[in-house]
Amino acid sequence: MSALLEKVKANLIISHDEDDALIESYVAAAKSYAESFQQLDEGYYNEYPISSATEQGIIMLATHFYESRDGSSGGFFGNNFRAGDQVWKTVHLLLRTGKEWKV
């Protein structure tokens, strides 16, 4: 089990392993999103360390993907129309610290 999978499961308060493959796919998607947002090469975080802020952004985003996979809720931010927006704002604040500011 990857360290990120363990951290996402802890964030979700999940102790079973039935959804590990699903959660791993959300971790991969969140990691890919972080790399794209930070203007890093695809697969960058497979070779280089992830900062604490970026790791937390990946954990929060993967958690959001899991908790709102049916599209009916905003995940851990609650079930309201602005919850999804708050997730993205928070994730973007965390990911900005590792962004390669290119012109």
Image (spheres, rainbow, N blue to C red):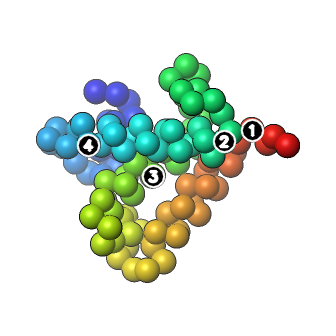
Q: As shown in the figure, which amino acid type bears the numbered disc 4?
A: Leu
Query: Where is 47 relative to 40, above or below?
Result: above
The residue indicated by pointer 3 is: 61
**Other residues around mark 2 within 10 Å, as few (<14) / some (14–19) / many (≥20):** some
The residue indicated by pointer 4 is: 22
Depth check, front residue: 53 or 87: 87
- Marks 3 and 2, how far apart in space? 15 Å
Q: As shown in the figure, which amino acid type bears the numbered disc 1?
A: Glu
Residue 88 as seen in the image, left or right of residue 74: right
Question: At numbered mark 3, what does the secondary structure look like: helix, strand or loop?
Answer: helix
The residue indicated by pointer 1 is: 100
Q: Residue at x 55, y 55 (%)?
A: 91
Quadrant of the snapshot with the N terminus: top left
Question: At numbered mark 2, what does the secondary structure look like: helix, strand or loop?
Answer: loop
Depth check, front residue: 49 or 69: 69
Residue 33 as seen in the image, left or right of residue 60: right
Query: Where is 44 relative to 76, above or below?
Result: above
Whether residue 93 is visible to the viewer of this picture, yes or no, is yes
Q: Residue at x 14, y 41 (%)?
A: 18
Point out the tag, 3 or 4, that comes first from the N-terminus. Answer: 4
**Other residues around mark 4 within 10 Å, as few (<14) / some (14–19) / many (≥20):** few
- Marks 4 and 1, how far apart in space? 30 Å
Label ID, residue 38: 2
Point out the tag, 4 or 1, that comes first from the N-terminus. Answer: 4
